[in-house]
Image (cartoon, rainbow, N blue to C red):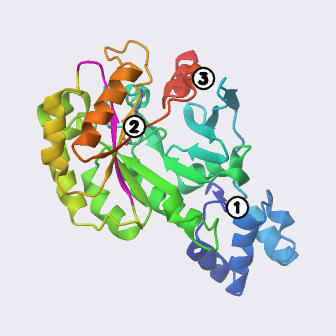
Amino acid sequence: MKEKDYLFGKTLEDLERITEQYGQKKFVAKQISDWLYKKDATSIMEMSNISKSFREVLNKEFFFGITPYVQVLTSKDGTKKYLFQYSEDTFVEAVCIFDKERVTLCISTQAGCKMNCDFCATGKQGFKRNLSTNEILNIFRSVEEYRQIKNIVYMGMGEPLDNFFEVKRSLEILCKEYGYGFSPKRITVSTAGYLPFLEQFLEQTNVDIAISLHNPIPMERERIMPIEKVYSIEKVIKVLRRFDWTKQRHLTFEYIVFEGLNDQDKHINSLLKLLNGLKCRINLIPFNTIPNSIYKGVEREKMILFQQKLNKKGFLTTIRASKGEDIMAACGLLSTKKLERK
Ligand code: SAH
């Protein structure tokens, strides 16, 4: 038997295909998308401007498609970590970060990850599966503060560009007028530099992008990020240089500052060579330690010193505030704990 599909997470085009298939007028698709993304309905039978008979057909063929979270942890600093369970052993995480008036949601795109970065708890879990558009967007729709969210970052579990098509569809629904009408400037997708879809991603979306750089020296980068061996950061930068990084679209390089590993003058010199003339920002990230890690983050003072050195060389450098350390905010930690219990 065919498994029931979800309506939530369908694009307007998908909905038009569905309405056409059942002999409905095209505008009915727009009515459905309003119920899905604007009116916060939770069931098909609530869609009162759609004929009862068609609602009954839809109800038979589809689930509405909202899955509540199974756990939430709140940090001393207010940061909230949500856990979603999408099947018996599929757990994904989301983090909600509060900064004065600004609420930022960090969402996941895969259960587990194939990139296997040595400092990342999700990488250590291995890869389970890609999340569907429904599952990615459900994270956004199902957190308690969803109507207050100002920024969305694709920086949770998984490599977004290794799930390009679902990620692209989720971005469409977030940004298009028929969906949530988010400004693409309020969304950032973070990638380890997954080349097979980088160009398509940059051509077909207009959200901001962050590249996990962490070390500009290839031999050193490949020790912490195996992706370097296949898709080198040099090749990634070459692709990035073909695009226009104006006020309309921002390029950020993420850089976890590890003790004694990537904060020396040689790294600054390599960064200068690698990023020469590229309009971008470097965001220094405090390391969120993970169990059995051989890595250590630098002390705050050292991080500031490194920032000052980079700024002196002309880089726009910022430091990410470390939030939610007491609730396992590092991506992958909470779901790892769940998997270990099974
Ligand atoms: N796969 C994507 C997005 C997920 S990770 C990527 O690699 O960019 C989002 C960011 O968190 C990346 O920059 C990643 O390198 C970083 N990260 C992973 N584990 C971390 C940890 N333990 N502490 C701090 N940052 C971490």
Q: Amino acid at mark 1?
A: Phe
Q: Nearer the viewer, residue 17 or 261?
A: 261
Q: Residues within 10 Å of mark 1 (few under 14, many from 20)?
A: some
Q: Provide the residue designation for mark 1.
A: 62
The residue segment tinted magenta is 250-260
Q: Is mark 2 within 8 Å of ligand 1?
A: yes
- Is tag 3's residue or tag 1's residue first in the polypeptide sequence? 1
Q: Provide the residue designation for mark 2.
A: 113
Q: Residues within 10 Å of mark 3 (few under 14, many from 20)?
A: some
Q: Residues within 10 Å of mark 2 (few under 14, many from 20)?
A: many
Is mark 3 in CB contact (under 8 Å) with mark 1?
A: no
Residue 161 spot, x, y in % from top left:
37, 52
Q: Nearer the viewer, residue 109 or 154?
A: 154
Q: Provide the residue designation for mark 3.
A: 327
Name which residue lies at 49% across and 28% down.
330
Quarter occupied by residue 238: bottom left
Quarter of the figure that contains the N terminus: bottom right
Q: Amino acid at mark 3?
A: Ile
Quarter occupied by residue 243: bottom left
Tell me the mark number nearer the camera, choosing from 3 and 1: 3
Residue 8 located left or right of residue 60: left
> Is 73 situated above or below 253?
above
The secondary structure type at the circle numbered 1 is strand
The secondary structure type at the circle numbered 2 is loop
